[in-house]
Amino acid sequence: MTRAWRIVQVVILGGVMAGCGYALTGKLNTLPASIRRIGVPTFENLSTTPELDRIFTEAVRVELQSRGKYLVVPETTGVDAVLTVSIKSVTPVATGFTADTRQASRYAISVIASAEFKEVKAAKAFYMNPSLRVSDEYDVNGSVAVGDLASLFAQDRNSLERLAKTFAQRLVSAILESF
C-alpha cells in the first residue's frame, strides 16, 4: 500500500508542478487582444555580413507566427503593430585554438541590434531595445580567419540559421512578455 501511495504522491506532485507555470516559460503573451496583424518589414543590415537581414527577418516572422494568433506580414500598412529591427554589428571572437598550430578553432559570434515593436493606432511602443545582444559559439576548421564572417557562415550555413533562430526566440519572447 505504501508503494502505491508514493506513486500517487509523485503523480500529484507532477500535476501541481505543471500547473505552477513551469510549462509556460517563454510562452507568455501579454499583448492586447487588438493586435492580430503584425508587420515585420525586412530588417536593416548595418553590419558587413551579407544576408543577415533576410535570414534574421524570416526567423523572426516564423517565430512570431508560431507563437499564436497573429498574422505576420512584410508590410507596414494595414497592420495593428510593426516590428522594426536594425542589425548594428556582428562580432566574432576566437574562444578556442588548436593545440598544434594555435589557430582559432572556435568562435563566439555576437550580434547587436536595435528593435522596436510599436502599436500603429496609438503610436505606442510596447517594446524598445537599442542594444539587443545575442551570442552563440561555433566550431570551425583552422582555415577561417577571425574577421572573415562570410567564410565562417559559408563553411557552416547552419551556424547562421542557428544564430538567427536564437535571435528570433529571444526577441519574440521579450516582445510578448514586455507589455
Image (tube, rainbow, N blue to C red):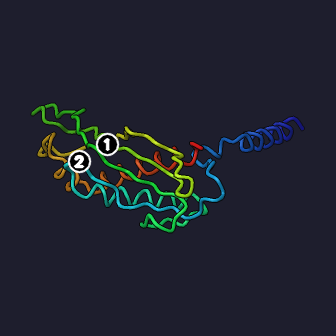
Disc 2 to disc 1, C-alpha distance: 9 Å
Instruction: Name the residue furthest right.
Output: 1
**Residue 51 placement (x, y as % from top left):** 25, 58
Label pair 2/1, CB-CB below 8 angstroms: yes
Position of 139 compared to 25: left or right? left
Q: Is residue 67 above or below residue 110?
A: below
Looking at the picture, which amino acid does disc 2 mark?
Ser
In this view, which residue lies farthest toward the front?
122
Instruction: Name the element at disc 2.
Output: loop
Q: Which residue is mark 2?
A: 47
Whether residue 153 sits left or right of residue 165 in the image: it is: left
Q: Nearer the viewer, mark 2 or mark 1?
A: 2
Residue picked out by circle 1:
111
Q: Is residue 86 above or below residue 65?
A: above
The C terminus lies in which quarter of the figure?
top right
Quick check: 171 left or right of 160? right
How many numbered circles does the render carry? 2
Rendering coords of residue 23 (x, y %) = 65, 46
Work out which quarter of the rendered image holds the N terminus and state it: top right
